[in-house]
Amino acid sequence: MERIGYLLLALAAIIWIVLLFIGLISLFPAGLIGLLALIGVGLLLAKVIKDRINNKDDDYYSKNIKE
């Protein structure tokens, strides 16, 4: 059930982002500002996720250190 919920949320987010891109492109040239901002946020989010996946220290502390 939890995976289905995450799948539906991811699907809704993807559809929303696609519609946002379409709307920004239709507002050319002013929409380019929003499009650039959206791409920048997406690149930063991808970097954060990549850094989190590749960080072994966080995995060690979350599994072995108890507060």
Image (cartoon, rainbow, N blue to C red):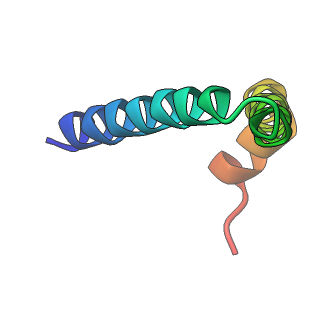
Residue closest to the eye, 64 or 45:
45
Residue 5 against residue 56 in the figure, above or below: below
Quarter occupied by residue 46: top right
Quarter occupied by residue 29: top right
Image location of residue 17, percent across then percent down: 52, 34
Q: Is residue 2 left or right of residue 15?
A: left
Q: Is residue 55 left or right of residue 66?
A: right
Residue closest to the eye, 60 or 26:
26
Q: What residue sits 76% from the left and 33% below the top?
A: 35
Q: What residue sits 85% from the left and 33% below the top?
A: 36
Quarter holding the C terminus? bottom right
Q: What residue sits 29% from the left and 31% below the top?
A: 7
Image location of residue 60, percent across then percent down: 76, 41
Q: Is residue 31 left or right of residue 51?
A: left
Image location of residue 32, percent across then percent down: 81, 32
Residue closest to the eye, 61 or 49:
49
Residue closest to the eye, 61 or 8:
8
Q: Which residue is outermost to the left?
A: 1
Image location of residue 18, percent across then percent down: 49, 27
Quarter holding the N terminus? top left
